Amino acid sequence: MTRIRRGYVARKRRTKIRLFASSFRGAHSRLTRTITQQKIRALVSAHRDRGSQKRNFRRLWITRINAVVRERGVSYSYSRLIHDLYKRQLFLNRKILAQIAILNRNCLYMISNEIIKEVDCKESIGII
């Protein structure tokens, strides 16, 4: 019985994995077993860090907004600004607010002043 020539499917699979690991160093880009281990490890890290990246950006945006808001008024803070925004049903997300805070501070000051005026006016009348 003649020998069966294998390798087409296996070679295709290995080259696909090698392309993924081509930028890795040493054996991590040359040996098939270590390539597969490193690929799994890299994908796990990427999946985990996507969540942490979202958390980190949210923290950054909150810090930026808070810094700009506190610059203007001593008694006013980030939490009060967000609370008042929700009271007025102005649904601006934190990313947009942070961009406004950095690029155009006066615009954020105007927004916060308008919110403060309206909320204070409604509280004095007794609507809220």
Image (cartoon, rainbow, N blue to C red):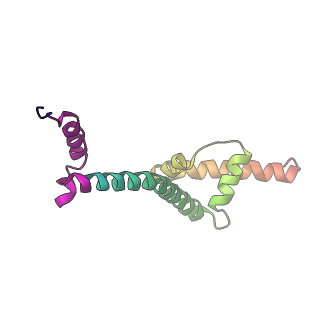
Q: Toward which corner of the image does residue 19 lie, by quadrant?
A: top left
Q: Is residue 41 left or right of residue 52?
A: left
Q: Position of residue 90 (x, y in %)?
A: 66, 42
Q: Residue furthest bottom?
A: 74
**Is residue 119 or residue 9 the one in the foreground?**
9
Q: Position of residue 42 (x, y in %)?
A: 34, 54
Q: Residue furthest right?
A: 126
Residue 112 visible, this orientation: yes
Report the label total.
Answer: 0
Q: Is residue 13 left or right of residue 69?
A: left
Q: Position of residue 122 (x, y in %)?
A: 82, 48
**Is residue 8 or residue 115 the one in the foreground?**
8
In magenta segment, residue 101: no
In magenta segment, residue 18: yes
Which segment did they paint magenta?
Answer: 5-34
Q: Residue furthest left?
A: 2
Q: Is residue 119 left or right of residue 70?
A: right
Which residue is at 24% across, 39% downward?
13
Which residue is at 39% across, 56% downward?
45
Residue 25 visible, this orientation: no
Q: Position of residue 51 (x, y in %)?
A: 49, 53
**Is residue 95 or residue 118 the one in the foreground?**
95
Which residue is at 12% across, 35% downward?
3
* Quadrant the N terminus occupies: top left
User: Could you tell me what secondary structure mostly forms the magenta stretch?
Assistant: helix
